Image (cartoon, rainbow, N blue to C red):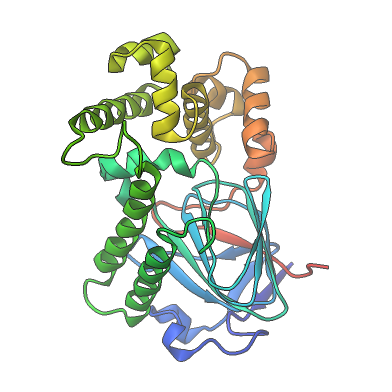
Amino acid sequence: MSYTVSPYKPSGDIPIKYRQPDAFDQEDPSRNVSDTLEIVDYIKDSHLRIWYNCQEDGYETHHHSAIEIIYCIENGYTVTAGQKTFNLQEGEILIIPSHMIHRLLAQPKGARFVMLIDPEPLMVYRDYKIVSPLFSQPMYLTARNHSGIYRYVADELQKATDIYFENLPMWEMNVYARLIRVFAAIGKDFFRGSENFEIGENNSHARVNYNKFADLLAMVDEHYPDDISLDEAADFVGFSKFHFSRLFKEYTGTTFYDHLLNRRIQAAEELLNSNMSVTDVCYRTGFHSLTSFSRSFKQITGFSPKEYRRYSEQYDSKRFSTSIIKKDQA
């Protein structure tokens, strides 16, 4: 079954300044959908797509390699991600990590910016790799729960959106510059007040600790398929395992074993988008049995590996994938 869905209706016309800057949007203001799949590409030769979304249709359960940032600007928006439901109110922000299963349910009337961001350009930065463990779960940013940075983050996202739709020369670098500021602010806020990791003029040991644990995360990122014990990780940074465990939780917000498990599951999510068998994915990512792999995968994602693969969006090189439109939310 095929049908088309207008990106400008039924919630009303998209303001001219928020219509897509590339050619296809002007020539064909509809989305071509086959069965439940909608083809949505990044802007050509870029790593971004930002939608001004005022659709009353929701988006069924799906995932993609892009980071998704939803900034609610009018009325509410309901999102299920990471086995949690978030009822976004006007002005609130939700960051959904790459490959996380999620589902979007629109309100009868409303608007929000949906930012789809290729994480690869960010991964060249050591600081982004340090902050990335914070995004093993969705990050919900409101004026209440992140009062210290909320206004700054919201302003930077609005500036990034304005730059995108203005579509002037160097727009992509300018958008990524704003996004980098957002992730840097989140990281600095997380470490604020930490005697062990907040780097300051009179806290030289914090810089030493910060760099040691950054090196450890880089090692884990490269060797996650290997059997890395708590003792080995503690030896890597030069602490007893008890002191190490406390510092690692302070540095990442999670335990060492949970971080290692999350890294393996993230790798498995990537590989499940290929033609590799589930068995090969299991052993390629450091698991020793299909039973433990399936159990761990479902515990973290809420789905078995086979179920997860069915929700995968089409992804072609750097071209962004598909979305799944839910026509009836009743």
Q: Position of residue 236 (x, y in %)?
A: 30, 15
The one of 156 and 144 positioned closer to us in this rendering: 144
Above or below for 152 versus 187: below
> How many marks are shown on the rendered structure?
0
Q: Quadrant of residue 192?
A: top left
> What's the residue at 63%, 26% (across, down)?
296
The N terminus - image quarter = bottom right
> What's the residue at 59%, 61% (across, down)?
323
Q: Quadrant of residue 282?
A: top right
Q: Residue furthest right?
A: 330
Judge from the rendering whether residue 24 lies leftward or rightward of residue 159; answer left or right. right
Judge from the rendering whether residue 98 lies leftward or rightward of residue 132; answer left or right. right
Q: Residue furthest front?
A: 202
Judge from the rendering whether residue 131 lies leftward or rightward of residue 171; answer left or right. right
Residue 228 appearing in the image:
no
Above or below for 21 versus 175: below
> What's the residue at 55%, 37% (across, down)?
272
Q: Position of residue 115 (x, y in %)?
A: 46, 65
> What's the residue at 67%, 35% (across, down)?
306
Q: Quadrant of residue 252?
A: top left
Q: Position of residue 309 (x, y in %)?
A: 63, 41
